[in-house]
Image: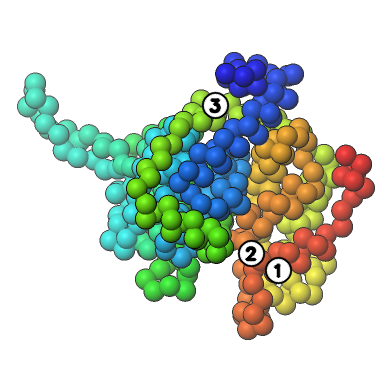
Amino acid sequence: MDSASSAVRSGVSGPSDVEAAQFLGQTCQRLHAELGKIIVGQRQVIEEILIAIFSRGHCLMQGVPGLAKTLLVSTLAAAMDLTYRRIQFTPDLMPSDITGTDILQEDPDSGRRRFEFLKGPIFTNLLLADEINRTPPKTQAALLQAMQEYQVTAGNHTLSLPQPFFCLATQNPIEQEGTYPLPEAQLDRFMFMVMVNYPPRTDELEILKRTTGAADPKIQKVIDANDIHRLQEIVRRVPVGDHVYEFVLDLIRSTRPNEPGASDFVRHWLSWGAGPRAGQYMIQSGKALALMRGRLHVTLEDIEAVAPPVLRHRIIPNFNAEAEGISVGQIIEKIITMIPKGKMDRML
């Protein structure tokens, strides 16, 4: 065990923050290496998921079937030594299938019957909500309290979830048959929307070779739940300059078409903008990204890097954007480039 990892696991504060940043960077490199044994490419997807995890956030992954979204999550759970449960969301799934339910049990000593709460699969460290938009909003809503408050209320029971707790959900494109769009309140609980796209030709060739051979790679544990919890605390301590806060605030408010001074293209293309939670998530994820890049302060470049996954499910294009073929990604890129940067970041 090196000095950086020893410092993190000892929980020492102060000077060890530098070592903790080194440890986080080394850990991410090792996680990329372990995941690379199973997952070909998708480095940007993996990085965004790691940022969310170390920021104590949740991820929504969108992509067509067959792009290894489920395999990525299960492999990540093994590399992080976390308890892992998968829920396959279907149209007939009920909220109690997620949270748990009361069952009638008989006491063998007294012979009396009583209700006992049987915990559902949500009581885990890493929950995969697979194809979350295949189930109606009533069942999707069973995740709301867990994702925000890290506890579950079912009947007369309110129970805390294991820590750390992450929900990584996958969803098929909305245009596909048999899907239910997630309500805005549900979408807003996810820190990132991660886009999983088709691999490039070289990666797809490697996928064909790996998955049709006899190799069976084993995933080694890189980090555990206690390490993750300590690193999350260190991420919270990363300082943020006032110019970064102002930049985030300008960025969020510029997405709102009804905001005074909103740009013409925002009024023309958007029907709804991002709320305050988007700004909170930008700051949190920017801190994690700064540490992962070996820095103890957040730059405007960090915010620009995390802005697309934070915003792409929080701004709602209108009919004009759809009719003109304008994507959410194009709108976000245009908004980012129009926000003036302060002088302070160039001095750092």
Q: Which residue is mark 1?
A: 331
Name which quarter of the figure residue 153 lies in: top left
User: Can you give x and y, in whole percent of width and height, for residue 142 in the image?
Assistant: 39, 50
Q: Residue at x 9, y 21 (%)?
A: 109
Question: Which mark identifies residue 227?
Answer: 3
Q: Residue at x 70, y 35 (%)?
A: 291
Which amino acid, mark 1? Ile
Which of label 3 and label 1 is nearer to you?
3
Which amino acid, mark 2? Ile
Which of the marked residues, 1 or 2, is nearer the chain's N terminus?
A: 2
User: Can you give x and y, in whole percent of width and height, for residue 125 in the image?
Assistant: 43, 36
Which amino acid, mark 3? Asp
- Dot 1 and dot 2 residues touching (CB under 8 Å): yes
Q: Residue at x 76, y 67 (%)?
A: 334
User: Can you give x and y, in whole percent of width and height, for residue 18 in the image?
Assistant: 73, 25
Q: Which residue is mark 2?
A: 315
Spatial CA distance of label 1 from label 2 is 9 Å
Q: Residues within 10 Å of mark 2 (few under 14, many from 20)?
A: many
